[in-house]
Every structure is written in C-alpha cells, then in structure tokens.
Image: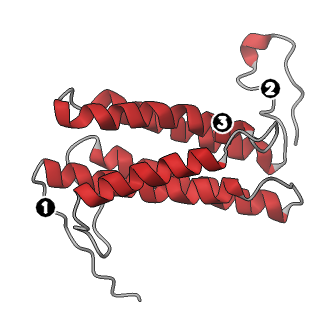
Amino acid sequence: MNPKKPRDKRELCYPFIFETQFQCDYEIATDELCCQVGAVLAALPAEAETREMAADLATLQRLIYNLNGSVRGRLGIFEEDLDWLKGRYDHYNEASRGRVTGFVLPQGPQPIPTLHLCRCGSKKVVRLLVRLEESGVRFDPILYRFANLLANFFFVLTVFLKLHWDVPEVPYISINY
C-alpha cells in the first residue's frame, strides 16, 4: 500500500515518506543519527576536557546531514572529511592509550550510552547503503568508508570519556564465537 500524499502539508512529515525504495529509509536513519549526536551534545558536561569533543560533534552533525543527501542528491562527503574524521579518531584513540582491545558492554553515565547508540546507528546506515547498492542505486563508495569510520569514531569517544571519568569498562566474553 502506498498512501497518497496529503494536500495539507501539515499532514506530511517528509516529502519522500511514502516512497517504497530504500533512499527514504537511509535518509531517516541518517537523520536519526544526527539527532542522537544532538542528544550527546545536550548531555555532554560543559567542562574544559569535553569542549573539543563538543566542537567535533557539532562538525559531525553537519557532515552526517551531508551524508544524508549524498545518495539522492549531490555527493557531500569528500576525502578531506574522511581525513578530518580519521585525524579526530586518532586523537581520541591516542588519548585513550588503546585501553579497549575487545568487546565491552555498552554502559556508563550519559552521554556514553547515547554514543553507543550513535555507533549502532552508524552501522544501520552502512547496512542501508548495502541495501541501496543491492537494489541498483549507485553512489560514491566514500559513503561506505565514512559511515564505517563514524561507527568506530563513536566507539573511541566512549572509551575516551570512560578513561577521563575513571569509569571501568565491563568486558564481554562471548559464549557464541
């Protein structure tokens, strides 16, 4: 069933909401990810040690919306964006001294759980890119690279904050693999 668009714009939340292809799902997933980053920003304490992270997350929100429009519209993610994000990843990873080398339970004080949701949201974006490509939609492979890097970046931020706040990591040892 594909309902018709209402005539009253107040009854339409998004122009593409009634599409049946994956582009709309992808755009909603990237929008949700950007909102989750906003939730992290709202929960991030205003202390000297987190100001840099807040600035990085504010930059990321714009990049996530560029990622959003890069399938339906013009490409908005570029090598310089990847280089910037890799540099920020390296910065937080070095500051965390490689503290985590395995699976950990996604827990801790806010905004750490929300950062883990951002990590999962980034993985969902990657999966939707896979589905888009599988359905015949063509886009620049840089989108895969950026979305995967986002997931890893959000994880390293959780490690950084836990180290900074002296919150222990809780290892998870799988009984399945």
Q: Does label 2 or label 1 sit earlier along the sequence?
A: 2
- Left-right relation of 22 to 80: right
Question: Badge 2: how crowded within 10 Å, few (<14), some, or many (20+)?
Answer: few
State the CA–CA distance, disc 2 to disc 3.
Answer: 18 Å
In the displayed structure, 129 sits above or below 3; it is: below
Q: Quadrant of residue 140?
A: bottom right
Residue 62's tag is none
Q: Which residue is mark 2?
A: 15
Q: Which residue is mark 3?
A: 66
Q: Amino acid at mark 2?
A: Pro
Q: Quadrant of residue 66?
A: top right
State the CA–CA distance, disc 2 to disc 1.
Answer: 45 Å
Q: Residue furthest left?
A: 166
Instruction: From the image, state whether disc 3 or disc 1 is nearer to you.
Output: 3
- Left-right relation of 177 to 169: right
SS at circle 1:
loop
Instruction: From the image, state whether disc 2 or disc 3 is nearer to you.
Output: 3
In the displayed structure, 103 sits above or below 52; it is: below
Residue 115, given in percent of the width and then of the height, sits at: 37, 47
Q: Amino acid at mark 3?
A: Asn
Q: Is residue 89 visible?
A: yes
* Of residues 99 and 68, the one drawn nearer to the viewer in this rendering: 99
**Residue shown at 65% from the left, 61% from the top:** 127
Q: Is residue 44 visible?
A: no
Q: Amino acid at mark 1?
A: Pro
CB-based contact (under 8 Å), mark 3 and mark 1: no
Residue 35, given in percent of the width and then of the height, sits at: 49, 33
Q: Does label 2 or label 3 sit earlier along the sequence?
A: 2
